Amino acid sequence: MQDNDQETDVVGEEIRATDEVVEEIQTEGNPEGEEARVEVPLTPEAEALKWKEAAIRTAADLDNYRKRMARERSEDLRFARSGLIEELLPVFDNFSMGLQMAEQDQDSMIYKGMAMVKGQMEDFLSSQGVKEVAAEGVFDPNFHEAVAEEEKEGAEAGEILYVKRKGYLLHDRLLRAAAVIVAKAPEAETQTGEAAE
């Protein structure tokens, strides 16, 4: 019986000593006496749950990364030839101008051969996803580049009059803006507009 009392006293002293050490640790780093957080060890079930959640989050992050990489790779493949096509466009423009000059003699073999080659070039561009920018109607700065303004009767201000150089889209992304000449407001309108201000 006496041994039990001694053991209880020893255990009690150890607990008090541990409490004192914890109090020292809590107040040591905090001069204002704020209590520091003491980490309580997790139960095995809580530890397993914590790691399971971490594994699920990591698996979801990896899956999202794979999907993003697949999407980016698909986009890269879709637009991989854009640089080459962009460099070919001036050649295509010059060829089209040559064809217009040869058009004067449509019965010549040169014209017929050039027309066939132009058709093949157009087929190639369309198979690569290249489309011509529509250059009719009202000027749109997202697709058109205004190189000049001209007055024209019956035309509204900002209306496209002529196309100087065709523009192209690659899979709905602008490859080259169309260079256009747009109608400007008649001088009388601009002067009356300035006078009204």
Image (cartoon, rainbow, N blue to C red):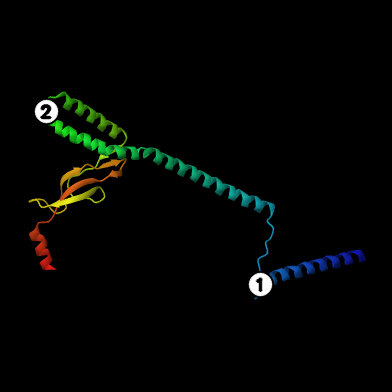
Label 1 to label 2: alpha-carbon separation: 97 Å
| Residue 92 point in image, percent of width and height | 24, 35
First in sequence, mark 1 or 2: give its number: 1
Q: Which mark is residue 76?
A: none
- Secondary structure beneath label 2: helix
113 to 168, vertically: above or below: above
105 to 5, vertically: above or below: above
- Secondary structure beneath label 1: loop
| Residue 85 point in image, percent of width and height | 31, 37
Question: Which one is closest to the eye, mark 1 or mark 2?
Answer: 2
**At x 40% / y 38%, what residue is drawn?**
77
Q: Which mark is residue 30?
A: 1
Q: Which residue is mark 2?
A: 105
Q: Is residue 39 left or right of residue 55?
A: right
Q: Amino acid at mark 2?
A: Asp
- Residue lying farthest bottom? 32
**At x 26% / y 41%, what residue is drawn?**
168
**At x 14% / y 24%, what residue is drawn?**
108
Estimate how packed mark 1 is, as few (under 14), some (14 to 19) or many (20 or more) residues with alpha carbons within 10 Å. Answer: few
61 to 191, vertically: above or below: above
Question: Quadrant of the image for the C terminus?
Answer: bottom left
Tell me if I can see residue 1 in this picture: no
Q: Is residue 154 left or right of residue 96?
A: left
Question: Quadrant of the image for the N terminus?
Answer: bottom right
| Residue 79 point in image, percent of width and height | 36, 40
